[in-house]
Amino acid sequence: MKTLQFTNGDTIPVVGLGTWKAKGDEVKQALKTAIKIGYRHIDTAAIYGNEVDIGEALAEVFAEGNVTRKDLFITSKLWNDAHHQENVIPALKDSLQKLQLEYLDLYLIHWPVAFKAGIPMPESASDFVPLSEVPISKTWNKMEEAKEKDLVKHIGVSNFSVKKLSDLIEKAKVAPEVNQVELHPLLQQKELLQFCTKHNILLTAYSPLGSGDRSEQMKAANEPNLFTIPEITSIAQKHNIHPAQVLVSWHANRGTSVIPKSVTPKNMESNLKAGEIKLDETDMKLLASLDKNYRFITGKFFEMPEKGYINIYDE
C-alpha cells in the first residue's frame, strides 16, 4: 500500500476511508469490512456524529486480533464550537473516549471558523465568534499541547488557504503537518499543493468523487458529475477501470492522500485498489487541463460578514 511520510518518519496510507454522512450500523459494518479488505487509514470527525459507532467497530476488530491499534492510522477533527483554548483538550478527550482510543494518529482543526461553545451549528450571527476573539493561533497552541501530551501523534488543519497556513506557521511552535481540503480534477489547488510541499505539509483530499450523496441543500443546480466528464471516462476506458478509480488514483499519482467515502464493499475495494494504479504522463496532462476551481463544498454556509467570515477560502 502506498504511503506518504511525515518529517519524523511516520507514514499515512495514501487511500483512506472517509466516513462523513455514514452512521450507525452502516458505518460500523463498513469500517469492519474496510479493515478486512485492507484499509489502514480511517477518517472521522466530531461533527460527523459517528465516533461512538466507529469506536465500537474498532473495539470489535481489535478483539478479533487480526489488526492492532498501531496498524491503523485514525484521524478526527476539532469542531468549530471547541476553539476556545479551555475546550480543545476536552473535545479531543471526548473524541478519544467515543472512539475507545488512547491516542489519535492525526487531529485537525476542522474549519477556520469559531462558534460559541456548545453550538454545533449556528442559527444566527450571534452563534459565531470572530477570530479576533478566538485566534486560530491560540486554538493551535492547545493542539500543540495535545501532541506534547501524546494524545495525538500529528496535528493539522482542514479547509485552510495558503494565507491562513502562512499566518499560522508564523505563530506556531509546531507547523501544521496536514491540510485536509477538497481536491479533484475540477479543483486542483496547485498553488496550495506547491505551498504545502515546500513547507512539509501533507495534503489530504476530501470529496474526491464529488460528494454526490451530500444533502440537497448543499448542492448547486446542475453541478457536474465527475464520473461522466469525457476526459475522465476516456482514461477509465484506456485502463479498463471505473472513472472513480481514475479520480482516486489521480491523488496517489500527484502525491496527496485521499479519503473517498463508501459503505459498499465492492466500491471500497475498488477505491483501495485505485491507489496502486499508475496513470501515465498523458493521463496526468489531460486531467490537469480540467481545472476550473470548482467547489462542491463552497463554504458559503459559514460566511458571516458581520463576524468577519467573508471568504472562507480567501479566493
Image (cartoon, rainbow, N blue to C red):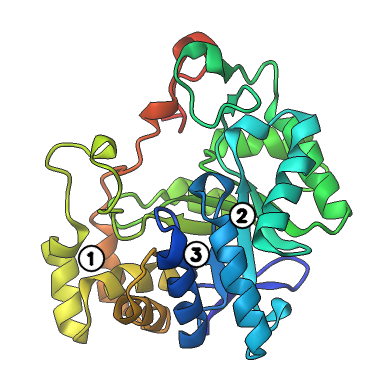
- Of badges 1 and 3, the one in the foreground is 3
Q: Residue at x 30, y 44 (%)?
A: 296
Q: Is residue 15 visible?
A: no
The three-letter code of the residue at mark 3 reads Thr
Res. 100 image quadrant: bottom right
CA separation, marks 2 and 1? 34 Å
Above or below, 97 relative to 121: below
In this figure, which residue is indicated by the disc labeled 3? 256
Query: Type of residue at label 1?
Result: Leu
Position of residue 195 measured from the top left corner of the image (x, y, whole percent):
56, 48
Where 132 falls versus 95 (above or below)? above
Q: Quadrant of the C terminus?
A: top left
Q: Earlier in the sequence, mark 1 or mark 3?
A: 3
Q: In percent of the image, x 19 and y 67: which residue is there?
A: 232
Q: Position of residue 199 (x, y in %)?
A: 66, 52
- Indicate which disc, 3 or 2, sits on the residue closer to the N terminus: 2
Quickly name the residue at label 1.
286
Check disc 2 and give the amino acid type: Ser
Left of 250 or right of it: where is 146? right
**To which quarter of the image does residue 18 belong?**
bottom left
Q: Position of residue 249 (x, y in %)?
A: 36, 74
